[in-house]
Image: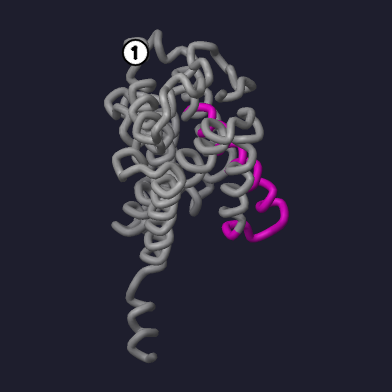
Amino acid sequence: MTRLADLRRILHGWIWVGVANLFQIILSVSAIVAAHVVKLKGAFGELGLRAPIGRTVAFSFIAALPMLLAFDVTSSINAKMSLLSVGVGCFVAPFAEEVLFRGYMFGQLYRRARLCFWLSALIPSALFAFGHAYQASGFWELVEIFVVTGLGSLLGCWIYMRWQFNLWTVFGLHCLMNLWWELFGVADTALGGWIANAARLLTIAVAILLTTYRDRFWKPLTSEGNAVDQTTEQSCGRSPGDRKLANSDEPFLIWQRAS
């Protein structure tokens, strides 16, 4: 027991976070495999992990650029960050959260259970916000966390839908926003106030703009998203005609059912 206690002290808290994140990913993939009787390839496609990555990198970087510039001008590099805090907090955790809350929960509710956008997005967003409640040290901070994470999750669901269920898009944005926050130690400085919030709001505005008019900034998405959907549908024993995805060519179309 003494050796076990010593081991736990050696292993940084981020290790346990990473283990929990890995469990979330395995749980989501396993649920898809079991529910749709598909192999891993089909499960990855269902979650949006087989979608093209190229343009999502550009989208994520451009959208998160306001945060990077604001933090770079007003703050210095965070001396407290570590390989674990960056690796887990900025890459592993965002990936696991997007897989579970956007790719799995929202995707299954919206595309398979055929619920409307708002209900499909509100359920995982409420759970996502609740999962961050531990970060609050008081009532008003809890309210702030619920508002910020809840609205952020709703935005993530909308971006995921508008980019034809490409999970790399929301993961890239989530990853970079966390990375800039950790890189400059925003939570531990005065920058964590209105400047940081203003930078985040500007990033959100840019993300909405780039998503709404994505076909004007990049080559129009014709069938790349649908190709992933068709592959998944066929692997599940269904034809693409069995259901209709939301029309991604209609800006802000969030009330149409996925059936």
Q: Which x, y percent locates residue 27?
A: 43, 54
Q: Which residue is mark 1?
A: 218
Q: Image point 31% across, 44% down: which residue?
A: 39
Q: Please tell me whether residue 141 belongs to the stretch shown in magenta.
A: yes
Q: Which of these two is toward me, 174 or 233?
A: 233
Counting the numbered discs, the total is: 1
Q: Classify 247 as above or below 125.
A: above
Q: Which of these two is toward me, 121 or 75?
A: 121
Q: Image point 52% across, 28% down: which residue?
A: 204
Q: Quadrant of residue 95?
A: top left
* 146 lies left or right of 153: right
> From this viewpoint, which residue is outermost toward the front?
237
Q: Image point 34% across, 72% down: which residue?
A: 11
Q: Which of these two is toward me, 211 or 68?
A: 211
Q: Which amino acid, by three-letter code, is at mark 1?
A: Trp
Callout 1 secondary element: loop
- Look at the image and give the residue range highlighted in magenta: 134-159
Q: How is the image coloured?
A: one colour
* 55 lies left or right of 17: left
